[in-house]
Image: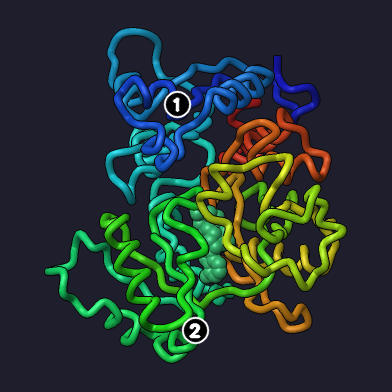
Amino acid sequence: MPYDGFLGLTRPLKFAFTFDSYSRGLKEGFTLDQLEGLEFAEDATVEGVSSALKKLGTVEMIDGVKALTMRLGSSSGSKADWDLVFNYCEGYGAVAGRESQAPALLEAWGIPHTFSDSATMAVCIDKSKAKMICEHFKVPTSPFAVIPARNSWPNDTVDILACVDNSPHAERLKEFPLFVKPSLTGSGNGVSQSNKAENREQLVKVIENLSKEHPESSLLVERYLAGKELTVGILGTGQDAKVIGVREFVFVKEGGPPPYAPFIVDENDLYLSQEVYGHLNKAGWDATRPNPWPRRLELNDPLAQAASKVALDAWRALGCRDAGRIDLRMDCKDLTKAVPNFMEVNTIAGLRPEWSDLVQLAEDNGIGYDQLIAEIVGQALKRLGMSRLQVE
Ligand SMILES: Nc1ncnc2c1ncn2[C@@H]1O[C@H](COP(=O)(O)OP(=O)(O)O)[C@@H](O)[C@H]1O
Ligand SMILES: [Mg+2]
């Protein structure tokens, strides 16, 4: 049955749902760590999305790009005549191109799909490239330089800091602290408090270590953003894009304050020992003792509005589609001067029910899980032209 009252659909839709599941990944021999790095989908996410889609129509489940290839190429069986592919494939093999794999295949076959196209996925998975585009369109993003992937260095004795010293932002990058992170990882992988460099000597060390841990990825050296951390949930495409939720992540002092009730935390204490949302915080997330602590902001709160403007400008500049999340940080602690800066966009944002940030941002503002999935479908249909579906 079509979603009750949803966009006036005249018939159930025919979906394919493409994803990369943990369970298949394990069968293929990937380790849990590798799968986490690849951001494969947990059972709860696969189940959540598919059951929400089933409220809008029929759903063909396709686990992985290889399965999609076989399905598209198979001469037997039914034709791949889906109205829409809900594409949640992370892809694998090619580090930088993985999220583009399923969209590129679907584009070649002329099959419409949710979320960004292959070219946008390839830009946005690379945090350095996304920042270059944002900078070009005057979206605030901290001054940066890019160090090529260690794999591509001619030898181990290259002058590591030459790229920083010769970058367009060389002057601004002489001031410390700076922050270094891999361009191509997600979910806090390769990110921790120790990525912050207070001087040139530390900077060389951080780059040395990170380039060895992630030789396949270029490294981003950025001005350290010392202010509040925010995430913004977006629904829609281009001028139709709107913000559905904004949260601040409030860092609390290590070990306390019991029982993690930030309203009793002295503002001055907040940024003392923890201020980076790294892998340990994300992988070891404990809902009863969260750090950082997510704080819902009203959409009309001035801080939320400033963040929303930058997030929407970035979303449109990058050409992202349907739904996703943008991570921001203010460039200083003084809120009278602070500007939200673009850090990264999540074009395939987590969709685990009750858990993922985008899901919670939507829930903060009265959009339940099934409705969120339906809205994503709705946004895709809108940009594709709904009439095609209503005619039949
Ligand atoms: N320039 C920066 N200044 C300060 N902190 C940063 C900066 N870039 C990233 N961080 C910290 O690292 C975390 C992870 O970075 P992000 O770019 O969002 O990557 P991901 O979430 O994919 O791991 C951010 O949430 C933030 O806490
Ligand atoms: Mg992030």
- State the residue at coordinates (60%, 59%): 327
- State the residue at coordinates (29%, 16%): 74
Can you give x and y, in whole percent of width and height, for residue 72 in the image? 33, 22
Residue holding disc 2: 176
As shown in the figure, which amino acid type bears the numbered disc 1? Ser
Say which of 365 and 266 sits in front: 266
| Mark 1 residue crowding within 10 angstroms, few (<14) / some (14–19) / many (20+) | many
Is residue 218 rendered to the left or right of residue 138? left
Say which of 163 and 365 sits in front: 163
Q: Earlier in the sequence, mark 1 or mark 2?
A: 1
- State the residue at coordinates (65%, 48%): 236
- Disc number for residue 337: none
Which quarter of the rendered picture does the C terminus lie within? top right
Residue holding disc 1: 21
Can you give x and y, in whole percent of width and height, for residue 28 in the image? 30, 23
What is the distance, in whole Å, between disc 1 and disc 2 at their CAs?
41 Å
Task: For ligand 1, tell me if the residue under mark 1 lies within 8 Å.
Answer: no
Say which of 90 and 391 sits in front: 90
Can you give x and y, in whole percent of width and height, for residue 5 in the image? 80, 26
Element marked by disc 1: loop
Can you give x and y, in whole percent of width and height, for residue 2 in the image? 70, 19
Element marked by disc 2: loop
Q: Quadrant of residue 375?
A: top right
